[in-house]
Image (cartoon, rainbow, N blue to C red):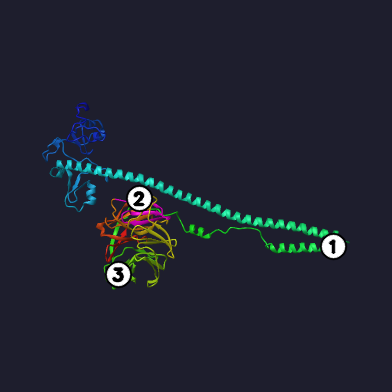
Amino acid sequence: MATGGCEETSDEIFNFKCTPCSKINRQRKAVKYCVECQGYCCQSCVDMHQAFPAIQGHKLLDKSSFKRRILTTNLPSVPTEICTIHEIKILDMYCGNHEVVGCTSCMALHHRNCTDVQLVSDVVETMFKKTGVDETHLKLQEKNIAIENIKTSREALLEELNKSKTDAVNEIKAFRAEMETMLQKMEKESIKEVDKEYQTMNAMLLEEIKKSENQIIGLEGAADNIKQSDGNVAQQFVSIKTAQKIIAQTDDIINSFYAHSHAKISFAADQSVLGFLQKLNTFGSVTRDTAYSVKGTREMNIIVQSDTSTCAVFGSCLTQGGKLLLPDFNNNKLKRVDIGKLSVEDYCDFSFGPSGVCCIGNQEAVVTFDNYTIQFVSLGNQMKRTHDIKLNHPCFGIAYKDDKFLITNNGTSLYIHDMAGTLLQTISKDSFGNDLLTNCRQIAFSDSGYKIYVADRFNNIVTLDRQGKHCNNFIDSDLTNGIGVCTDRKGNVFVCAIESKNIMQIRQNGQKVGIVVKPTDGLFRPWSITFSPEMNTLFVTDDNNDNVKVFELQ
């Protein structure tokens, strides 16, 4: 009987390998096939079958056992892989209709209506190609590399996610610390006010006590003088007159004192602060640093019957009631659009073409004109012009915050005016005296209101603080000539660029997120953008176009 010592092992290549030995990473040449074990056996495993009574009766086959076909190898080609679903059966069946292998139970359950179900051993010689093994190995390697790259990228993203969570939590804690610092300052100022009032009342009461004590001494002295002058009429007369004078002085002092019934101070807390905080559930909103994508696209025609030219809309804004305001420069109109019906519901005529628009409340908007004018418009059932203000510069883009107007001139300056039109500040230079702006257009505020984003044709986005100090510029190779800007009120800024014909999403800290809308989505030369957080929708006006693009995002 052969022994294991003379068997072929290690790195040699065999047509059939011993199934049990392969499971322990040993390569040995198979000499038999065991029907009951459903696997190939080397000589040692064949000998093992003879050594154990439980497997002595197993049927061991070799080449001579297969009379029906000519075998080119010493053993028949039989599947040995176990079915992952039916774990006690071999994958020995093939469905030609679906080109899948399975065990007998798989075929009975899922392929009972298929017409081309055969044993793998019956089809392998006609269907198997050696080149298929190499091709499959190559594809497996390619897919393995691809999935490894995905795994690596996801691990990097997971690491980034974990870090961003830590950063977000730290931002929350830092924000709370900032609030606590402000509260501590407010507390000190409030206590200082209490102390100031206390010192005032304390000093007044001490002064009145002092005057009272002095006057008591005077009154008691006058009474003693009258008593001591008894018998001396002349002196008694003098003492009475002196006492009368002291009595009159006492009346004056009594009348000069406030009629204090209580001497206490109290503090009335500003309930609006508490009321504001009670309306909040969190310090802010949680955002995902992933780019929006276009879910659906529509177009909205904004022509009205009295229009004489192709529409040209350089700016836009949403009212508090959810209407879209569009200043149509070519047709001298401010148009109000029902974004639910995607149609113009009314308009207001002007004698000159409007450029920009912003809302200053639920019932009023302000429109800019290049002729140094801003026009106030009532947003009642029918829009109506009310009054205008003449300024000392051209007016293009406009935004409103805290009773102040921020107005661009489509050039190198941003102006800040009060509600009466008084110029408060001109922003045009950085701290080094260099031009800060080149061709400034639309304006937007950060969610907190502490930052100002100015769409500037050659700088894309110029970020300022509320005092007008330059923070940074956003320049990116994927964005050329940014002229429109708005926010999603969730920590993101949208910028539309007329030359790159796209819309980019950036974080309010200046970090690029990605391209949201591409030229292939239907953008031609976008001029202005407005976002509806309620509808998750971007409204985009194009270069001289009668239609407004409506992009539903996800």
Three-letter code for the amino acid on which mark 2 is drawn: Gln
Label 1: element kind: helix
Does residue 339 appear anywhere in the picture? no
Could you tell me if the residues under marks 2 and 1 are in contact, i.e. CB atoms within 8 Å?
Answer: no
Q: 10 Å neighbourhood of mark 2: few (<14), some, or many (≥20)?
A: few
Label 3: element kind: loop
Which image quarter: residue 5? Answer: top left
* Real-space Cα separation, disc 2 to disc 3, in angstroms: 38 Å
Task: Considering the whole magenta stretch, tell me its main secondary structure.
Answer: strand
Q: Position of residue 439 (x, y in %)?
A: 32, 57
Q: 10 Å neighbourhood of mark 3: few (<14), some, or many (≥20)?
A: many
Residue 331's tag is 3
Three-letter code for the amino acid on which mark 1 is drawn: Gln
Three-letter code for the amino acid on which mark 3 is drawn: Asn
Task: Pick out the residue farthest to the top.
Answer: 5
Q: Position of residue 547 (x, y in %)?
A: 27, 65
* Real-space Cα separation, disc 2 to disc 1, in angstroms: 97 Å
In the image, 257: left or right of 8?
Answer: right
Residue 511's tag is 2
Q: Nearer the viewer, mark 2 or mark 1?
A: 1
Q: Position of residue 4 (x, y in %)?
A: 22, 28
The C terminus lies in quadrant: bottom left
Task: Pick out the residue farthest to the left.
Answer: 70
Q: Earlier in the sequence, mark 3 or mark 1?
A: 1
Label 2: element kind: loop
Q: Is residue 4 magenta?
A: no
Task: Pick out the residue farthest to the right.
Answer: 231
In the image, 508: left or right of 499?
Answer: right
Q: Nearer the viewer, mark 3 or mark 1?
A: 1
Could you tell me if the residues under marks 2 and 3 are in contact, i.e. CB atoms within 8 Å?
Answer: no
| Residue identifier under label 1 | 236
Comparing 64 with 224, the one in front is 224
